[in-house]
Image: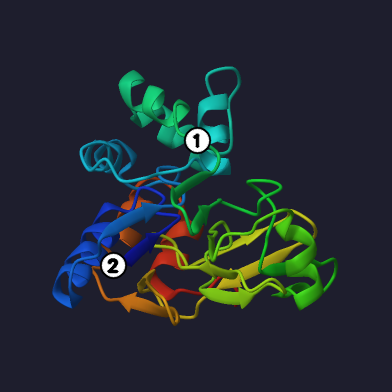
C-alpha cells in the first residue's frame, strides 16, 4: 500500500494543488492522509476548506483547528482569527467533527503533535535559551505512549523527519505543505525552518519486507502566497513563505 502524507496546509491552497499535481505525476497513492492544521493563516482558508471537504480524505484535527474554533468565544491569535472570520459555519462544523487521532489502516496511526497532545513536539525538542533541536531517541520513545502500529504519522513542527521506536514503529513527520518556516515562544523562543520555500509532503509504501519513506519538496508559486500574506497584514508569514527561513 502506498500512502501520501500531508500536514500543516495552513490555508495555502496553491501549495496544496502543487503537491497533488506532483503526486499525480509520481503515481497516485492508494490513500491520502491529512494530519491537521488545515486552515489557520493569512492565506485562503475558505477556499482550502471547500476543496478539502470535497475530497473526503482521512483527516484529523490539529491544535489550530481547536484554536480556530475557540475564536467563537474570544478573539484568538491573528492566524486563527483570520481563518475563523473567513470560513463559513458549515466549514467550521466540519472542523469541529474531525477526530484528534485516527487509524486509517491497521498498521497506521495518525496524530498531529504526539500521541499525548496535539501541541507537543514529538520529533523535535525545544531547549530554553537554545532553541529547537532534533529529539533524542529517549525523548521520542517517552512521548510515544502506547503506540504499537508499524507507522505513526505526526505533523505540527513542519520539519520533515523520521525516527524508529524501540518496538520497531516508524514515526514520520512529512513536513508542512503550506508553511516552511515559523518562530514560536512555546517552551522558549525558537525557530523552525526548512531553509527553502517548497511545499513538503511524504509518501510511504508499506511492504511485507519493510517500509519505504520518501520526502518530497515541491516547487509552486510561493511568491503569490507570500504576496497574499503581505496583503492581509502578515509580514512575518510573507517572509517565511518566500524564503523558508524564520531566522535572520
Between 165 and 118, the one lying in front of the other is 165
At horizontal 34% and vertical 29% (from top left) the residue drawn is 87
Q: Nearer the viewer, residue 13 or 151?
A: 151
Q: Position of residue 72 (x, y in %)?
A: 52, 19
Q: Which residue is mark 2?
A: 223
Q: Position of residue 248 (x, y in %)?
A: 60, 77
Give the residue displayed 34% in from the left and 64% down from the top.
3
Q: Is residue 139 left or right of residue 33?
A: right
> Left of 193 or right of it: where is 24?
left
Which quarter of the figure is the N terminus placed in?
A: bottom left
Q: Residues within 10 Å of mark 1 (few under 14, many from 20)?
A: some
Please give the residue where the numbered disc 1 appears in the rendered image: 99
Quarter where residue 193 is shown: bottom right
Viewer can see residue 98: yes
Are the residues at dot 1 and dot 2 in contact (C-beta closer than 8 Å)? Answer: no
Q: CA distance from mark 1 to mark 2?
A: 33 Å
**Height in image: 186 above or below 208?**
above
Amino acid at each position: 500500500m502506498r500512502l501520501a502524507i500531508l500536514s500543516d496546509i495552513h490555508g495555502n491552497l496553491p501549495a496544496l494543488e502543487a503537491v497533488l499535481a506532483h503526486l499525480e505525476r509520481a503515481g497516485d497513492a492508494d490513500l491520502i492522509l491529512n494530519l491537521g492544521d488545515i486552515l489557520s493563516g493569512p492565506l485562503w482558508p475558505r477556499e482550502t476548506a471547500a476543496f478539502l471537504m470535497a475530497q473526503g480524505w482521512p483527516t484529523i484535527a490539529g491544535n489550530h483547528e481547536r484554536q480556530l474554533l475557540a475564536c467563537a468565544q474570544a478573539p484568538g491569535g491573528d492566524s486563527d482569527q483570520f481563518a475563523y472570520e473567513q470560513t463559513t459555519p458549515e466549514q467550521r462544523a466540519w472542523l469541529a467533527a474531525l477526530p484528534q487521532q485516527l487509524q486509517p489502516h491497521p498498521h497506521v496511526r495518525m496524530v498531529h503533535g504526539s500521541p499525548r497532545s496535539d501541541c507537543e513536539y514529538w520529533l523535535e525538542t525545544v531547549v530554553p535559551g537554545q532553541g529547537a533541536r532534533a529529539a533524542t531517541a529517549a525523548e521520542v520513545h517517552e512521548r510515544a505512549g502506547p503506540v504499537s502500529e508499524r507507522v505513526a504519522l505526526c505533523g505540527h513542527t513542519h520539519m520533515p523527519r523520521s525516527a524508529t521506536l524501540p518496538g520497531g514503529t516508524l514515526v514520520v513527520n512529512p513536513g508542512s505543505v503550506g508553511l516552511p518556516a515559523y518562530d514560536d515562544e512555546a517552551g522558549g523562543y525558537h525557530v523552525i525552518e526548512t531553509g527553502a520555500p517548497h511545499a513538503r509532503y511524504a509518501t510511504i509504501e508499506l511492504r511485507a519486507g519493510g517500509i519505504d519513506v520518501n520526502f518530497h519538496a515541491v516547487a509552486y508559486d510561493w511568491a503569490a502566497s507570500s504576496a497574499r500574506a503581505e496583503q492581509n497584514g502578515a509580514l512575518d508569514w510573507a517572509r517565511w513563505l518566500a524564503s523558508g527561513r524564520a531566522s535572520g
